[in-house]
Image (tube, rainbow, N blue to C red):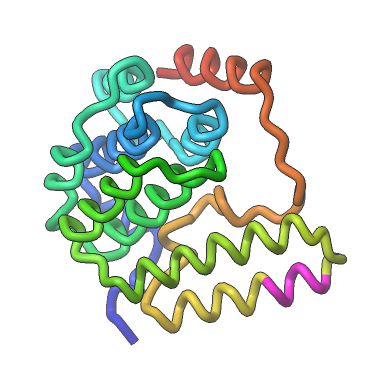
Amino acid sequence: MNQSSIVSERDIFATSSESELLAFYGSLFAIAAADGSVDIDELDLLFKTINLDKFSDSAKAQIQSYTARPPSLTDCLQTLSKSEEPLRLGVMYFLINIAGANKTLHPAESEAIQSAKKLLAVSDLQIQAMQEFIADMKQIREATPNKNQASASFNSAVSQLKTKGIPLDLIDRKGTTTNLSNPKINYSDESFWTKLKNFALTA
């Protein structure tokens, strides 16, 4: 088993520097804006991912500024290119998730994903595994099976992901993209602006 797969969640994110975490979140804002516009559903998923607890006040203000002026994706990825593998895999996983949050993939987003794959040293096999897992999660939600069926399908999908060396419990530690309690996720302007206001107030 890959050594990075057995490192605890606390070790991975507790030992990440603030600059790495800024780059992590900065890259997510950057991919959301890669197609020239930021969709509500992309930012909704992004805000669910963000945790400001570990940041200094200046860093929180910097992340807040990303809502209006996303940073350079390349600059963020270069900062992360030498990070621990689970952190790099986590960035890649969320880049793919956010780029596809609005159910379409713009050519600029596809190009950004390919650039990220190279800079983060993520293999084609790992990219494919992530894409398949994300598609599986979508199918599980849309099928609205009973709880036991959903759990069995989810565990099978997670197992397949782990065989490719991708530790889901580390890269999506909050369960941001795997929460099956509400299969039908609805986005609204009202909920988005409420989140944006709360995010700005927190930052």
Which secondary structure class fits the magenta region best?
helix
Please identify the quadrant where the N terminus is shown. Answer: bottom left
Between 18 and 120, the one lying in front of the other is: 120
Q: Is residue 39 above or below residue 140?
A: above
Q: Judge whether 51 appears above or below 197 on screen.
A: below
Q: How many marks?
A: 0
Vertical side of 183 occupied by 109: above or below: above
The stretch in magenta equals 148-153
Membership of 31 in magenta stretch:
no
Report the residue at 61% width, 66% height from top: 136
Which is more toward the observer, 88 or 11?
Answer: 88
Residue 184 at x, y = what percent? 76, 45
Q: Quadrant of residue 34?
A: top left
Residue 202 vs residue 108: left or right?
A: right
Q: On the rendered structure, is 171 left or right of 74?
A: right
Q: Is residue 149 magenta?
A: yes
Q: Quadrant of residue 189?
A: top right
Quarter of the picture holding the C terminus: top left
Q: Which residue is located at x 70 percent, y 74 percent?
A: 153
On screen, residue 57 above or below 12 = above
Between residue 88 and residue 70, name the one nearer to us: 70
